[in-house]
Amino acid sequence: MDEPSEMQQMIDAIRTTMELLGDGETSTNMSAYDTALVALVKNLEEGDGPQFPSCIDWIVQNQLPDGSWGDPAFFMVQDRMISTLACVVALKSWKIDNANLCDRGVSFIQENMSRLVEDEQDWMPSGFEINFPALLDRAKDLNLDIPYNHPVLEEIYTKRNLKLSKIPLELLHATPTTLLFSLEGMADLQLDWEKLLKLRCPDGSFHSSPASTAAALSQTGDKECLAFLERLVNKFDGGVPCTHAMDIFEQLWVVDRLMRLGISRHFTSEIEQCMDYIYRRWTQKGLAHNAHCPTTDIDDTAMGFRLLRQHGYDVTPSVFKHFEKDGKFVCFPMETNHSSVTPMHNTYRASHFMFPGDDDVLARAGNYCQSFLQERQASNKLYDKWIIAKDLPG
C-alpha cells in the first residue's frame, strides 16, 4: 500500500486534533499569574504548606531570562508585570527563593513600573485593574521592595474603583457577571461567600478562572472548587491556564479557520459534529466560551450565529439585544471597558447573514461595528489582545 501523501497526512493530523475538541483535553497556554494564585492556596488539612506544591515547582522552573514571568512568546508589559508580581508573592509567601528568583523578579518590577501606562488598554489582561492593586497589598504585607507610590498606579486604582462602582455587591452576589473572573482581587470587599458559591459553574469553577476559583477555595474550602483545581494542576503538571475549558470557543474558531482556508470540504463530518455541539448549547442570550460558563459574550455569540446560519441551523438575531447598551454593542453585559476589535469584527461579519423579516437589531449591530472598525482602522489601532496576527500591529 502506498504511503499517505503529505496532504493526506496533514488532513489526518487535523482530524485527530478535532477529535479532542469539546472534551476538555485541549487548552490555552499556561498562565504564570493563575499558577501563582493557585500556588498561594494553603494546605486545607494542615495549613502550614501549599495545597498545590507542584505549582510552586512550575514557578521555579519558568522564570524568563529577564527576571519576569509571563507569556514567553509575546511581551506585553501589563501581563509580565502582574504575572511577575504574583509569582514573587507566591515564592515569598512560602519562603522560597532558589537562585535569587524573587530578587530578579522585584528588579524587573522596579525597572518596568513606569511602562504600565505605555500599553494601550486593548492589551490589558482581563481583570488587571482589579487584581494588580490587590497583589500590591499582598506584596506590601510581605515587605517586598516595590514602588507602591509610583504615579502610574493612581490611574490603575481609579479604574478599579470605577469598575467596582458599576456593579454593586447585591448584584455581584445574585447574578453571574464577569467580576466572578476576578474574585481574587476583591479581598478588601465584604463578599458573602455563601451566596457566591451558588454562582459557581457546574464544573466547580468561578467563571472558568483558576485564579478566581483558588480565591474561593482559600475562603471556603469548597470541595467542588478543590476538585476543579486538582484536575487542572494534575493535567498540566503544575501549571494552569488562564481559562478552562474553552470547548465552544475552540470549536467555533477551528470551523471558521477551516472554512476561510478553503479546506473545509475535507472535514465535512467533523464540522457537522462541531456545529451540532454548538447548536445544542445555543441559548436565548447567545454563547459563552464554554458550556459551563453562564456569562455569554458577543464574540462567541456572533461567531456561533454566523456559522450556525451558514450551516442551516435555525437561530434568531434577537440574542444581540442582550449586548446592546445605549446605542452601542459591548462584548459583555455591564461591561465598563470599551469594545475590542475582534468581537466587533465578528459581529460585523455576523450582520451579513440577515434574513428577510429578521429583527433590525442585526442591522444596528452591523452599522455600529462598521463605524467602530473604520475609526480604528483610520487611527491605526487594529491591535487586540485576543488575537495576534501576522499583518496586524503588535
Image (tube, grey):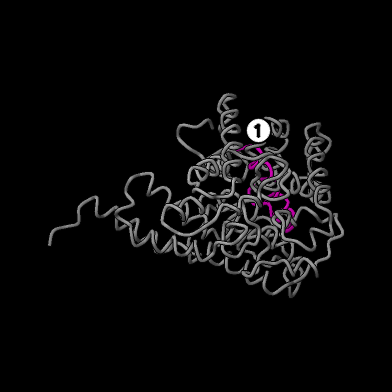
Query: How far across and down, in percent of the image, does residue 92 sit?
Result: 73, 53
Q: Secondary structure beneath disc 1? A: loop
Magenta stretch in the rendered image: 76-99
Q: Quadrant of residue 275?
A: bottom left
Q: Quadrant of residue 213?
A: bottom right
The answer to whether residue 125 is magenta is no
Give amino acid for label 1. Asp
- In this orientation, which residue lies closer to the viewer: 281 or 258? 281
158 with respect to 309 (left or right): right
Above or below, 81 against 15 in this view is: above
Residue at horizontal 77 percent and vertical 52 percent from the top: 185
Q: Residue furthest left?
A: 1
- The quarter of the rendered structure image containing the C terminus is top right
Residue at horizontal 66 percent and vertical 49 percent from the top: 323
Query: How far across and down, in percent of the image, does residue 158 sit?
Result: 82, 39
Query: How far across and down, in percent of the image, does residue 35 sit?
Result: 63, 56
Residue at horizontal 60 percent and vertical 42 percent from the top: 365
Above or below, 129 against 209 in this view is: above
Q: Residue furthest front?
A: 357
Q: Main secondary structure of the magenta part?
A: helix
3 with respect to 357 (left or right): left
